[in-house]
Image (spheres, rainbow, N blue to C red):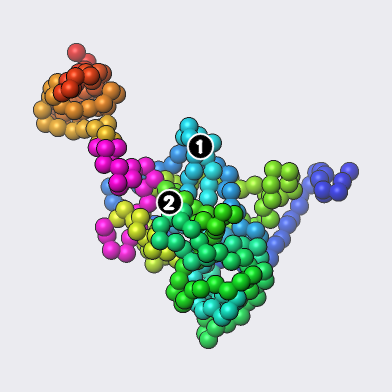
Amino acid sequence: MINDYQIGAFRGRKLIQRRGEVGGAKSVFVKLQGIKNELVYPTFGGQIMNPFKGAAKMFAGDLCEYRTNDKGVKPEIYILKTYLVESVSGSVVNIVKDGYKHIPFVGDKIGVAPDEIGGAVTAVTISSISVTKVGDVDVWACTCNSALTAEKGDVLVEADEDGNMMVKAINGVFDADADMLDAPSTGDDDFDGARYMYTPALGGIMYIHKMSPMPQCVLALNKCDIHGWFKVDGLAAPEGDVALNAEIALLNQNGTTVPTTSTKGVVGSTYTVTVSGSEALYVCTAVSSDATPTYTWIKMFPNV
């Protein structure tokens, strides 16, 4: 029996064909020698909370936000959608169209990227889209509900309902192309639309020229000093949090001498003696509460 939702059984084989265009593919990741785990992953992925409104694609190397609650669990994924401006004429924004750009949709709220991630965006809403050319450049001509102040080369981003940039942090990256071919669910009560789940990498190094367009507020977060490369590191502490960075540095230490009561650490941190023939592993088991703390280190390997 087939009901209104086209649910049923077919005890044979079914061939499904579909035609459409969502974009091309590139080898975007930098391959490093001697580092086997440059792509690291969280234990759990999450639901993509801002999927495209129609058939579209996220590309390998596209950035995202891996957002958890105040307990560090129940992750949600917010993808960084970006659009490169070719020209603007009144309420029509011409967005560069090729096989490696995100596809805009009617109803999208977009605006010029703010100075800081998650900042306020002067957003407009796309009301209609047509495919045309500006000179020799293929574009999506997006008619919006009002005029947008933007120039050729500006990068637009998605805005939330509060008029802020949808993505609040950059701490994840898509490790592979993701074709999103089905119309997404519009809410908890929509059981016909698709719900997309993904586990992004929390770190990776990409060639910038192969990545989707990035606004300056995103480029400013680049953790790599190699020209032309972009590194995302979701496990690094914010650069301004000096105290937290210092504490993270104490978690795993190396040295050529045995740790003493003045060797700083935190409970549970490790210290490895690296001298050949005298290798040993110590764990910090206690830190005193004195004005000048003392540290207790227990030798774990070799067994004593």
Q: Residue at x 69, y 47 (%)?
A: 187
273 is higher (above) or lower (below) than 129: above
Q: State the image coordinates of residue 19 (x, y, percent, origin top left).
A: 68, 66
The residue that disc 1 covers is: 69
Q: Amino acid at mark 1?
A: Asn
Q: Which residue occupies the extreme top position in the image?
A: 304
Disc 2 and disc 1 in contact, CB within 8 angstroms: no
The answer to whether 4 appears left or right of 224 in the picture is right
Q: Residue at x 59, y 66 (%)?
A: 124
Q: State the image coordinates of residue 87 (x, y, percent, origin top left).
A: 51, 79
Q: Image quadrant for the N terminus? A: top right
Q: Which residue occupies the extreme right position in the image?
A: 1
Q: Total of numbered circles in the picture?
A: 2
Q: Residue at x 38, y 63 (%)?
A: 216
Q: Amino acid at mark 2?
A: Ile
In reply to whether residue 48 is colored magenta, the answer given is: no
Q: State the image coordinates of residue 137 (x, y, percent, origin top left).
A: 52, 81
Q: Give me the disc on residue 39.
A: none
**Over which residues does the magenta segment extend?**
225-246
Q: Secondary structure at mark 1?
A: loop
Q: Dot 2 surroundings within 10 Å: few (below 14), some, or many (20 or more)?
A: many
The residue that disc 2 covers is: 170
Q: Nearer the viewer, mark 2 or mark 1?
A: 1
Q: Nearer the viewer, residue 236 or 32?
A: 236
Res 267 → quadrant:
top left
Q: Residue at x 32, y 64 (%)?
A: 228
Residue 108: tell me if it is visible. Answer: yes
